[in-house]
Amino acid sequence: MEFLRPTTLAEALAVKAERPDAVPIAGGTDVMVELNFDHRRPEALLDLTTVAELAEWSTVDDPGGTVRLGAGVPYTRVIAELGESVPALAMASRTVGSPQIRNRGTVGGNLGAASPAGDTHPVLLALDARIEVASVRGTRLLRAEDFYVGVKRHALAEDELITAVHLPAHAGPQQFAKVGTRNAMVIAVCSFALALRDGVAGAAIGSAAPTPRRAKAAEEFLAAELPWGSAEALPDSLKRRFGELVAEATSPIDDVRGSAAYRKHALGVLARRTLTWAWDDHRTGERACA
């Protein structure tokens, strides 16, 4: 197995163009597990840990503000530095593995693995994030919902690398919740993210379908039924219907972590809870604390 180690993004893209079979590795929290269990044996690894351009984030000065998060920024920095501007992403990052894994793992790596259970995927979908990918041919932006095309499959061309994620900054109340078989170092049984902003709702599920997915009927229901601009509490009937629509958006399976029926039930509960928390933030004018 060859170990390729570029030091600049331009060099990394050139290597990927020449060796499209090379598997990118940053934190290694997914790739190394697959190698250790002999689930894959690539001809080459493309180490991106020394590519400085991937390890920074910035705020783009456009209407409303956009965070451009480099694909190599570890979860610990997301938690410490982006909790105010993208709180749901910081919440999801807190649930990833152990401190050691959060020090190494990245949102870019989560995207590259494209697992239905990836913790950050529901947040990217709920916030309608854009995934920046690049090759020697140029750079393009993909909507998050167009990125996931199958179980552990994404929409990248074989010569492309994930370079960044673009997310709206300070995009209103946001929440993330996850169910696992224990409180730490666990793959999600199911997960859910919710974002409320200017009359628009974003809602997305994880680990309850072949890919992470948006709950579009639930989003449309909230956009039409929430008393935007009001500080009134939400009726239980509205929360209950929202939970039902989220559950209906799933197509889960039975596996060692949980049954399909349990996942549907749990996501309905998570949907009601996160809506309550996000709407409380909306009523008080406060952003969620990550």
Image (cartoon, rainbow, N blue to C red):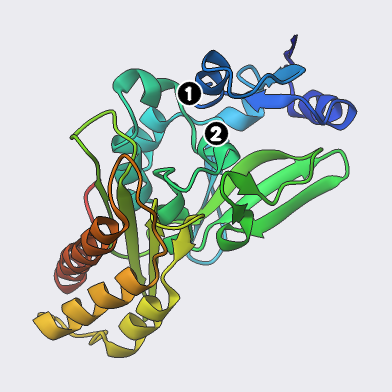
Q: CA distance from mark 2 to mark 1?
A: 8 Å
Above/below status of 127 relative to 29: below
Task: Name the quadrant containing residue 148.
Answer: bottom right
Q: Residue at x 74, y 28 (%)?
A: 9
Above/below status of 256 relative to 129: above
Q: Give the x, y percent position of residue 116.
A: 47, 48
Residue that label 1 marks: 29
Badge 2 vs badge 1, beta-carbon distance below 8 Å: yes
Image quarter hosting the C terminus: top left
Task: Decide if residue 6 is on the left or right side of residue 260.
Answer: right
Task: Name the quadrant containing residue 242.
Answer: bottom left
Above/below status of 46 relative to 75: above
Name the mark on residue 109: 2
What amino acid is at disc 1? Thr
Q: Residue at x 88, y 44 (%)?
A: 137
Q: Give the x, y percent position of residue 246.
A: 32, 71
What amino acid is at disc 2? Gly
| Mark 2 / mark 1, whichever is N-terminal | 1
